[in-house]
Amino acid sequence: MLDLKLLDIIACPVCKGKLAYDKKNNELICKFDHLAYPIREGIPALLYVEARKVSVNEE
């Protein structure tokens, strides 16, 4: 479970844009770069190499 207060201070490491929390998949989504960053044990893995590409439909 992610502490939602983090969403105010963390950003996409690629574009520095705002991230959205996807509770269902336990990921942070960058809608600008179409990337999903996993959250493991409550800690976002904000590394490009850890991200997966998401389709526009998934966002």
Image: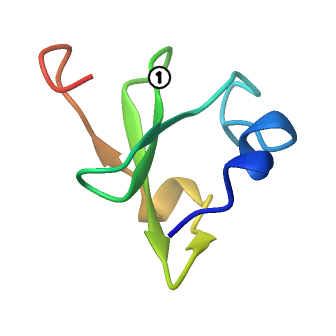
Q: How is the image coloured?
A: rainbow
Please, which residue is most extreme toward the bottom here? 41
Q: Is 36 situated left or right of 33 in this image?
A: left
Q: Is residue 27 left or right of residue 30?
A: left
Tell me the element at label 1.
loop
According to the image, label 1 marks what residue?
Answer: 33
Q: Is residue 17 above or below residue 43?
A: above
Along the line of sight, which residue is nearer the eye, 51 or 10?
10
Residue 44 placement, left or right of 22: right
Which residue is at a point 50% across and 14% down the rendered structure image? 32
Identified at 51% across, 85% down, the residue is 41
**Residue 44, position in %: x, y?**
60, 65
Residue 46 locus on image (x, y percent): 62, 58
Q: Amino acid at mark 1?
A: Asp
Along the line of sight, the residue nearer the viewer: 6 or 45: 6
Q: Quadrant of the C terminus?
A: top left
